[in-house]
Amino acid sequence: MSIVKTQPSETSGDINDRWSPVIAVALSTFTVVSSEMMPVGLLTPIADTLSVSEGTTGLSLTITGIIAAIVSPFVPALIGLHDRKSVLVTFMLLLALANALTAIAPSFLLLASARIFLGISMGVVWGLAAGLGPRLAPSARVPFATTLIFSGVSIASVLGVPLGTYIAMALDWRAAFWALALLGVIAAAALTIALPALPAHQTSGVAGTAGVLRNRGVAAGMVITALVVVGHFAGYTYARPVLEVDAGMSAGLVVVCLLIYGLAGVVGNFTLGPFAGRCTKAATVAALAGVALATFVLPFATASTVAVLVVLIVWGVSYGGVSVSTQTWIGKADPARVEASAALWAGVFNASIALGAFAGGLVIDCAGTGAVMLSASLITLVGLIVAVMSRPQPEASPKMNAEPRTRV
């Protein structure tokens, strides 16, 4: 890894007292996650229009996740010394273009092609945004800044997917992607106005990025992230069929359920997020335990709408804290290489989304909705065991571990 020190342009008086840069990044994460997750709320109408199965339509998430997972770990090496602000703005505009291409896609092949561009954009934006908290806030406020940045993830579930589902009901599923294209342009404009220049403080080659895995705390955090995200998306990608088929809900009631789930996710983000700054392991364990429990119980709760809503609230609160708690885990384990570890974490996160959506599609097509939720629970449970047995503390250097000599 080569280190290049650059005098930062942001000053504490300028940035630390203003939250507009953090909010602009949060808007970007909201747009990215809304764009990625939109097929979840539109699975059935997209499948009907393009004459493919719901399992095939779910591959649109897999494609995006795979591309983002490939791109994210290489972001520090690829962008080198380029100003991070300029890179973020450029790839938010590419994301807007990808959504516009999705909106006009006449076939699943062309829709999948558009989602490749979306995956590239996601990989870069996630790879940078995940580690920006320490650059946009003073040390005492970094946990809240990170929580605010990742609030875009949970708020996307509240406003993004349900609103897109509502737009599809009122107009057409393509209109939802046109709305996302416009939002991408707005997010790029917000980044242009609000962010200061973000010159590179260091560059990391591919070997340097992969090298963070030699830290046991980072490696454990990556494994935990992979397992909970695979488990979550194996189930959540196919939540709509569960609600429609097993619980017999109408499309309108499904929208309400997704909205309540999303609101719970916001609560989880702003509850578990700051808590993760103080008690990282406890917050991570709580988040994974809730996801494992909710995905296990949901198939048994479909006889009652109230029971379904209770399970979705538990699921939403729990998963709402996953992004910020796992990223905090990674950052605490190796605070000296935040950008490199954040880029690798983003790659793991997106690869896990792809694997989860793909695995869930295979299970639901072969064994049905109950089996897909049980699989999601078991995978998450393994992640919970790893979290209980691990810790995020940074490893002590050899000098710190050495026994002090006693003078005689």
Image (spheres, rainbow, N blue to C red):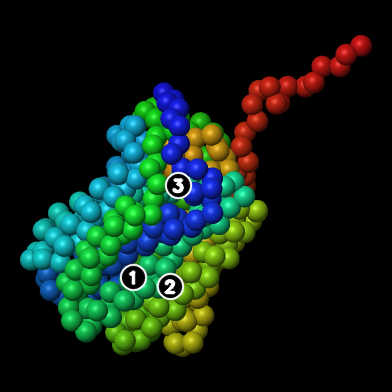
Label 1–label 2 contact, CB within 8 A: yes
Above or below, 166 relative to 325: below
The numbered dot on residue 262 is 2
How crowded is the residue under tag 2: few (<14 C-alpha within 10 Å), some, or many (20+)? many
Residue 246 visible in this rendered orientation of the protein: no
Q: Residue at x 59, y 59 (%)?
A: 274
Work out which quarter of the rendered image holds the C terminus and state it. Answer: top right
Mark before the other along the chain sequence, 1 or 2:
1
Question: Percent position (x, y) of residue 42?
Answer: 25, 73
Question: Where is mark 3, residue-wise?
Answer: 132
Circle number at residue 160: 1
Residue 329 badge = none
Q: Considering the numbered disc 2 on the image, is that residue within a helix, a strand or a loop? A: helix
Q: Examine the rendering and report whether any part of residue 403 can be seen.
A: yes
First in sequence: mark 1 vs mark 3 = 3
The mark closer to the camera, 1 or 3, is: 3
- The span from disc 3 to disc 2 (Cα, nearest Å) is 24 Å
Return the x and y of residue 154 as percentages of the image width and height: 44, 66
Between 140 and 254, the one nearer to me in the picture: 140
Give percent across and percent down for residue 217.
57, 40
Pair 1/2: label in front = 1
